[in-house]
Image (tube, rainbow, N blue to C red):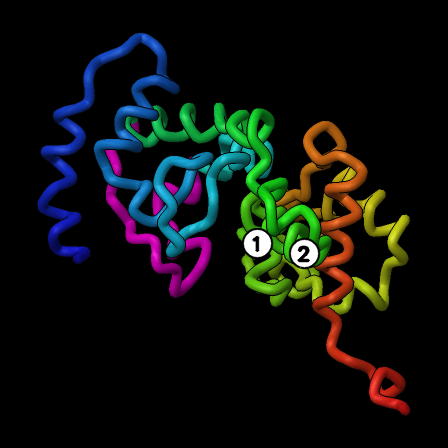
């Protein structure tokens, strides 16, 4: 599969129609490279190998996206995303496109409001977690592990014990406002990965569903088994 990808890349990039808008050029390159094989943008694509990118422009800075696309495995050892060895201009166009992805498809149509999903707060919260992109940094089912520089533990924290550390109102407020991690070493560059605030994207009932899901991830305590 990877060998076929390497062969097709030069043809895909040459097929991109020229445009004066870097984001438009990036969208064309994104399509030509077949990124939707692994990623989703709104209802386009649907690959499960990589995270949903519908809100990636909210979640990551242009500087970090550029760093990631230069060499994904240099940031995250063992990542399934290959190094496509993109030329600087191609990478710049892709970054411009990714930065433009601010969740617009989900502002119009909320997939987590579909029948059979909205009525179940935990199921709804799980879909929000995955489709909005929390999973990209906090990991599948809150396992954590996504690398970050100059933070304690060198990674974005997991959320399996969010129930122990945050009440429902506290966790909602953290998600609403986001968080800039404290540098482990103040003399070194600050962390590249920050948690964005979702107050302008998620409604109160969506935050409730997301927190319901996050609290459900906690391992059972001994008291939970008491009769």
Q: Which residues are magenta?
A: 66-88
Residue at image location 26% in from the left, 37% down from the top = 86
The residue under label 1 is 135
Residue 91 location in percent, x, y?
33, 31
Q: Which one is nearer the viewer's eye here, 126 or 143?
A: 126
Q: Which label's residue is closer to the chain start, 2 or 1?
A: 1
Residue 84: say if magenta: yes
On screen, residue 104 versus residue 66, left or right, reads: right
Location of residue 16 with respect to 161 vertically, above or below = above
> In the figure, is residue 189 to the left or right of 93?
right
Left or right, residue 107 beside residue 69: right
Q: How many residues crowd mark 1 within 10 Å: few (<14), some (14–19), many (20+)?
A: many
Judging depth in this view, the residue of 182 and 164 nearest the camera is: 164
Q: Which mark is nearer the camera, 2 or 1?
A: 1
Which residue is found at the position 71% from the left and 35% from the top?
Answer: 202
Question: How far, Cα to Cα, is label 2 from label 1?
Answer: 19 Å
Q: Quadrant location of residue 44? A: top left
The answer to the question of whether label 2 and label 1 lie on touching residues, with beta carbons closer than 8 A, is no
Q: Would you place residue 94 above or below residue 64 in this image?
A: above
In the picture of the structure, the residue carrying the numbered disc 2 is 151
- Expressed as whole percent of the image width and height from the top left, the position of residue 225 reads 83, 88
């Amino acid at each position: 599969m990877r060998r076929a990808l390497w062969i097709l890349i030069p043809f895909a990039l040459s097929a991109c129609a020229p445009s004066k808008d870097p984001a438009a050029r990036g969208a064309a390159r994104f399509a030509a490279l077949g990124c939707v094989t692994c990623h989703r943008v709104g209802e386009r694509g649907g690959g499960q190998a990589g995270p949903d990118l519908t809100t990636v422009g909210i979640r990551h800075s242009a500087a970090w996206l550029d760093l990631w696309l230069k060499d994904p495995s240099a940031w995250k050892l063992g990542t399934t995303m290959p190094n496509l060895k993109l030329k600087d201009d191609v990478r710049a166009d892709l970054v411009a496109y990714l930065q433009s992805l601010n969740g617009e498809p989900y502002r119009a149509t909320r997939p987590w409001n579909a029948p059979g999903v909205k009525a179940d707060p935990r199921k709804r919260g799980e879909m929000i977690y995955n489709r909005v992109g929390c999973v990209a940094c906090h990991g599948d089912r809150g396992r954590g592990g996504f690398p970050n520089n100059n933070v304690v533990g060198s990674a974005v924290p997991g959320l399996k014990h969010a129930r122990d550390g945050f009440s429902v109102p506290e966790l909602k407020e953290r998600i609403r406002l986001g968080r800039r991690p404290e540098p482990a070493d103040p003399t070194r560059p600050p962390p590249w990965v920050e948690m964005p605030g979702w107050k302008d994207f998620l409604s109160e009932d969506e935050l409730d569903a997301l927190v319901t899901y996050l609290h459900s991830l906690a391992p059972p305590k001994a008291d939970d088994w008491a009769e």
